[in-house]
Image (tube, grey):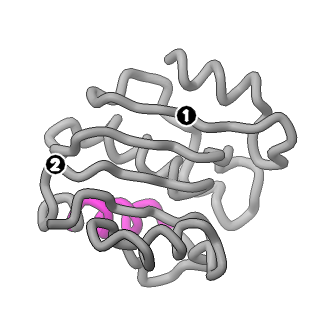
Amino acid sequence: MIRTLLIPGLDGSPAPHWQHWWAATDPTAKIVEQHLWSDPTPEAWLTEIAAATLIHPGSVLVGHSLGAFAIVRLLANWPQIRVAGALLVAPAESSQGRRTKRFGPIPERDLGVPSIVAASRNDPWMEQDRARALSEA
């Protein structure tokens, strides 16, 4: 029954973050847990997200910050992943933080699924013009 997989960012976007509220109020939503929220590795994060999509095929992926970046990387590099779409909220540039640099640059290509980027003018992790350019890519 899960239809929405929530992918938090660095440190797990702890409660009372909006993703925890969503998971607590929507029985069709689930947070994808990561082994090491504070020391992310792309291989581990992408494996956990991919595994969740195998358990819940056709779900919508909703990511925040580094979680949004991880979704982009997953869909760009693993086209066989079957999801209904992606909502990328305040995506983060991985090069902006020392703990996230190993994620490399954000892939700039079509993700193969309907996607929405929600960004703001005052986000410290990605300028709005950059988010717009990625959305167009």
Residue 48 in which image quadrant? bottom left
Residue drawn at point x = 68 percent, y = 44 percent: 93
**Residue 100 located left or right of residue 34:** right
Instruction: Work out whether 20 lies above or below 134.
Output: below
Residue topped by disc 1: 117
Instruction: Give SS at disc 2.
Output: loop
Residue 95 coordinates in the image, percent (x, y): 71, 47
Which quadrant is the N terminus positioned in?
Answer: bottom left
In depth, the one of 23 and 86 nearer the eye is: 23
Q: Which of disc 1 and disc 2 is earlier in sequence?
A: 2
Q: Nearer the viewer, residue 120 or 39?
A: 120
Where is residue 67 drawn, in percent x and y? Answer: 51, 57
Q: Is residue 89 magenta?
A: no
Q: Secondary structure at mark 1?
A: strand
Q: Is residue 51 above or below residue 11?
A: above
Quadrant for residue 119, please give it.
top right
Magenta span: helix, strand or loop, mainly?
helix
Residue 61 image offset from top left, x and y in percent: 35, 51
Determine whether label 2 and label 1 are within 8 Å by CB.
no
Q: Name the quadrant containing residue 35.
A: bottom left
Segment tinted magenta in the rendering: 41-51
Q: Relative to 66, say whether 115 is above or below.
A: above
CA–CA distance between discs 2 and 1?
19 Å
Q: Which mark is residue 58?
A: 2
Seen from the viewer's position, the closer of residues 77 and 92 is: 92
Residue type at mark 1 is Val
